[in-house]
C-alpha cells in the first residue's frame, strides 16, 4: 500500500529553488532539493512515490532483469560515492506496463518495489502524483537527472542536474512529436532538455508554495535540445489507476 501521508510535510514537499539551468551543459542541484529523486542502476532515473515503490520508465528494462541485482540510490546528489544520509537498496520486483510499445514508447511506465521500506527524512521523501488538472500546459515544469550533458557523449555529471522547462500544449505536442496526448505530455525550451541517462526520471510541477507533483516521466525525444523537437514524457495522470492496481490504494 502506498503510504505517503506519513512523510514529513506530506508527499511532494520539496525545497526546490531554481536558477537558469539545463541538464545539457547543466547546473548542479542542491542537497535535499529533490528528496524524491532515485538513481535506477546508474543508467536511469526514478522517483520515490511511497515507502516501498519507485516510479520509472518501462524502456529502462528488457523484462529479463534480476530485481535483486538492480541497485537503487536514494537521498543522494552524487553517484560516484556514498553520501551521508543516502541509501542504497536492491529491488524486490520490477513491473513494466504490460502494453508498453518499444516502437511508439506508448505506456512507457514501470514500477520498482524496493527490497525494504525506507524511513522518510529531509533527504528521502516521496513525490505526489498529479491529476489531469495539475498539469500546467503553457507553464513551467522541472526535470532532474544524471543523464549525459550532450547528445552522443558519455559525459555524465558528477552531481544531480536540474532544468526548468516550458510545457507546451497538447496540440503542439501532437504536432511536433506525433505523441498521443492521452499518454504523453511535452516540454520544449530553447537549448534546454533532458538527455540520454535521464530516462525514467521525474518531471514535476509546482502545485502551491513548497508542494510539487509529478506530471511526467522522462520517455523519449528527437536528440537533445534540438530546435522544435520537444522532450516527450509519459503522462502520469493517465496511469494512476494502473499504479494503484499494482501497488495498492493510496492514502494521499
Image (tube, rainbow, N blue to C red):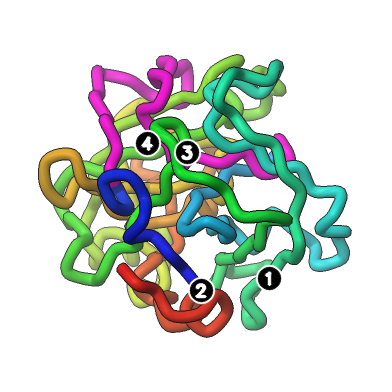
Q: Nearer the viewer, residue 183 or 203?
A: 203
The crowd level at tag 2 (other Cα within 10 Å; few <14, some 14-19, many 20+) is some
The answer to whether mark 2 and mark 1 are in CB contact below 8 A is no
Per the image, the residue denoted by label 3 is 124
Number of the label disc, if any, that sits on residue 248: none
Per the image, the residue denoted by label 1 is 95
- With 175 as the anchor, is 52 left or right in this view? right
The crowd level at tag 1 (other Cα within 10 Å; few <14, some 14-19, many 20+) is some
The crowd level at tag 4 (other Cα within 10 Å; few <14, some 14-19, many 20+) is few
| Label located before the other in sequence (2 or 3) | 2
Q: Which residues are magenta?
A: 13-42
Q: Is residue 81 visible?
A: yes
Whole-angstrom CA distance, mark 1 to mark 3, is 22 Å
What secondary structure is found at the residue carrying circle 1? strand
Label 1 or label 4, whichever lies nearer to me, is 1
Q: Nearer the viewer, residue 30 or 234?
A: 30
Residue 249 at x, y percent in the picture: 43, 80
| Label located before the other in sequence (1 or 4) | 1
Quadrant assignment, res 13: top left
Per the image, the residue denoted by label 2 is 1
| Label located before the other in sequence (2 or 1) | 2
Whole-angstrom CA distance, mark 2 to mark 3, is 18 Å
Amino acid at each position: 500500500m502506498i503510504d505517503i501521508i506519513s512523510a514529513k510535510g506530506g508527499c511532494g514537499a520539496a525545497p526546490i529553488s531554481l536558477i537558469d539551468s539545463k541538464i545539457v551543459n547543466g547546473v548542479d542541484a542542491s542537497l535535499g532539493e529533490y528528496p524524491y529523486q532515485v538513481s535506477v542502476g546508474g543508467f536511469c532515473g526514478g522517483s520515490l512515490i511511497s515507502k516501498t515503490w519507485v516510479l520509472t520508465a518501462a524502456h529502462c528494462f528488457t523484462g529479463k532483469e534480476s530485481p535483486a541485482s538492480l541497485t537503487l540510490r536514494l537521498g543522494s546528489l552524487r553517484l560516484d560515492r556514498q553520501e551521508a544520509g543516502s541509501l542504497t537498496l536492491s529491488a524486490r520486483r520490477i513491473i513494466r506496463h504490460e502494453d508498453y510499445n518499444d516502437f511508439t514508447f506508448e505506456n512507457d511506465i514501470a514500477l520498482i518495489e524496493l527490497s525494504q521500506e525506507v524511513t522518510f527524512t529531509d533527504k528521502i521523501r516521496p513525490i505526489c502524483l498529479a491529476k489531469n488538472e495539475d498539469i500546467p500546459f503553457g507553464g513551467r515544469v522541472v526535470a532532474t537527472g544524471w543523464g549525459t550533458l550532450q547528445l552522443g557523449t558519455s559525459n555524465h555529471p558528477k552531481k544531480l542536474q536540474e532544468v526548468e522547462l516550458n510545457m507546451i500544449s497538447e496540440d503542439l505536442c501532437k504536432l511536433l512529436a506525433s505523441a498521443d496526448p492521452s499518454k504523453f505530455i511535452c516540454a520544449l525550451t530553447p537549448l534546454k532538455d533532458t538527455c540520454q541517462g535521464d530516462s525514467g526520471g521525474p518531471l514535476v510541477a509546482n502545485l502551491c508554495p513548497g508542494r510539487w507533483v509529478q506530471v511526467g516521466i522522462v520517455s523519449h525525444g528527437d536528440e537533445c535540445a534540438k530546435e522544435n523537437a520537444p522532450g516527450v514524457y509519459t503522462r502520469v495522470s493517465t496511469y494512476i489507476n494502473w499504479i494503484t492496481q499494482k501497488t495498492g490504494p493510496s492514502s494521499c
